[in-house]
Image (cartoon, rainbow, N blue to C red):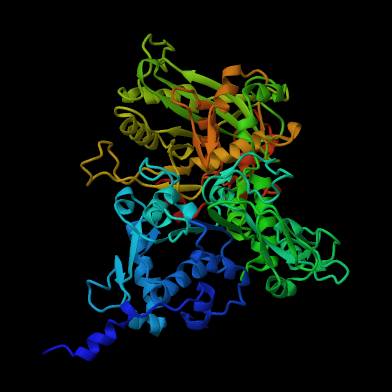
Amino acid sequence: MYANALDLAVNQVDLVRPPREISVSQCAHETRRVYEVGAWDNNIAPYMIEPMDMLNSDVHTGLSFMGPARSLKTDSLVMNWQQHIALFDPSDFMLVNMSMGTCRDYVKKDIRRWIEGNLEVKNKLLPGKQNDNLREKVWANGTVFIYGWATVSQLASKTIRRCAITDYDRFPLDIGGEGNLFALTQKRNQTFNAGVLKNGMTMAESSPGHMYTEKDYKNKATPHIAPPAPGIASLYNDGDRRLWYWQCKNDTCKKYAPAEFNNLEWDDTPDHEAAGRSARYICPHCKHEHTSGERYSLNQKGKWLSEGLKINSKGEISGQARESSMVSYWLEGVAACFQQWSELVTKYLKAKEKFEDTGDYQDLKVTVNVDQGKPFCKPIGEDETTADQLQEQAKDFAKNKVPKGVRYLIGTVDIQNGSKGRFVCQVMGFAYDGKKYIIDRFDIRHPVDPETGEISERRVMPESAPEDWDQLEHQFMNKQYELDDDSGRKMGLKLVLSDLGGTGATTDNAYKFYRRLKKKGMHRDFMLVKGRKQIPLVKVSYPDNTNRKDRTADARGEIPILTINTNRFKDMISASLIRVDDEADLVLPDWLPFWFFKELTAETSINGEWKCPKGTPNEATDLCVYALAGSYSDKVKADKINWSDPPAWADDWDNNSHVTGNTNTPKKRKRLTAAQLAALNA
């Protein structure tokens, strides 16, 4: 069958027809249909009109947009841009995704729905797998869309006029040691920007995801500057720094001000939901209150202003705009079209309360980043905390005695191998008011014969001598500590947790020790612990290496391992140290040597991940983390204890089941069910 000459001519007309000059926002308004919604409406998010149109700027080579979730930033800047290119702006285009998997999912779902839902776009797509696949889309006007991911090989050796990066702050800050993703991507359209007119564009959009520690970053000379966080905030600061301004609706004011979360107010009530419902926006000039129902009209009259520009009540703009090859935007969540003020406030208050109660700021970071659209400043300042400061804050209480208020003790062990092999042991006391106390810290350096008390001259060898692990039972697990009330009574350890990682056969020897404890019925008071990064706060796992030739440790799926999120627990420990002077949650005694305080301040948090300089001791930090993690384990559940009716091991000293020398009979434990007994014996 021969091709029809007329059909061939019709199919090739887009190659010779001059493209219609139309902006991205107007293209979206006239042609775009949104999956399961209908026609695109620029009035829903009017703050996105200017950023969309600046994608075709002939004076800028880059565009960055920092904003919250549910603001239509991705749909506007990624999907509408593709619509415009496919229909009216013949240019090769590349979208950079996080990974091969996310790229495939994005093309199969979002891109497929976009094409199927827009008939005019679908008709421009050339048929055949060579033109329509998960990596490329080829259009009738000769344009090629490439969907890739963030690797050096994916970004190399390509010349592409239009490039987009979505969720920029979810990418690594450095790509394969070659630099940040924006700079690498922008190299792809450098050829188009060599002349006076700039024809290439690289766009990045994201809600902020990285933290910063410099709290006082504001400078009166640069009121639009964002906090000094890496990622999308850094790109914004490199640009001309445009903020979204609202005009006050008070007829006697009519002044403009940036739409900021800090201008929200709410009722002072312990009911966070009620506080959220009372949220209103306050004009910083006249203090006029705007209700959430007025946000739509506030956005309709909103204006983007670059740093250096001013706007009066008549909407007249003056001043000298900051110059940059990057046009950059920052929108806060208070203006986002699908972000309710009540939710913003309620989520913020709940997350803030959680941080104040536990020291865990993860939820606070999420709502500030994703809902408010702001970089997150760590509420704790590790960089400002020194060993000297901690030692100065140390309190005077008796060495190796249990302070008043402490209800249970948790012991922790850090493994040190090599020529200075030892078990580093520490005891932390937990009080009913949330305070924690360091009770003891010592090393088990030499094996001791439990019958004769004879001390061996050799060092313990956790990695090569399985029997040395029994020293934890003999020299630590059975220790008791005198109560600080002159009664002579003593308190035993509720739980002991030990690290199990290290060189040689450390892990295998840890498993063997657990099995020996289980034979004696002592395993209920002992847990092995392992640190991870991207997991819930605590999680119990049962390693099984029976079918894995790459693992040497004898794990058979029967030993519970408390897997913990070390980064989050280190955040909590740090927060417990940096409260207001005498109100610190982690109370350090003044009898501790200075090296302890140095260990506790050895690590620094960089972009949410704690780092310890190579060769710097940090055992105090790790041991505190293990103890706090143990308090969150199912064996303790400290956050669930009802202190008006606590379990026997957490009762007051006169009724505590772990206190010896009591004349009172500790209250009976509740009878356990068969399922509970089975879980304990696991």
State the residue at coordinates (56%, 53%). Answer: 208
Residue 106: name its quadrant: bottom left
The residue positioned farthest toward the front in the image shown: 196
Residue 27: image x %, image y %? 49, 78
- Position of the N terminus by quadrant: bottom left
Residue 454 position, x and y percent, is: 41, 10
- At a point 45% along the width and 71% down the height, the residue shown is 79
**Relative to 452, 582 lies left or right:** right
Left or right of 220? Residue 142 is: left
Determine if residue 646 is in view: no
Name which residue lies at 71% across and 25% down: 393
Where 503 sits versus 37, above or below? above
Residue that lies at the very extreme toward the top in this rendered image? 457
Where residue 247 sits, quadrant-wise, is: bottom right
The answer to whether residue 455 shows anywhere in this view is yes
Work out whether residue 449 or residue 355 is closer to the camera in this orientation and state it: 355
Residue 304 in percent (x, y) is at 65, 63
- Hey, which residue is sitting farthest right in the picture? 252
| Position above or below: 334 against 1 | above
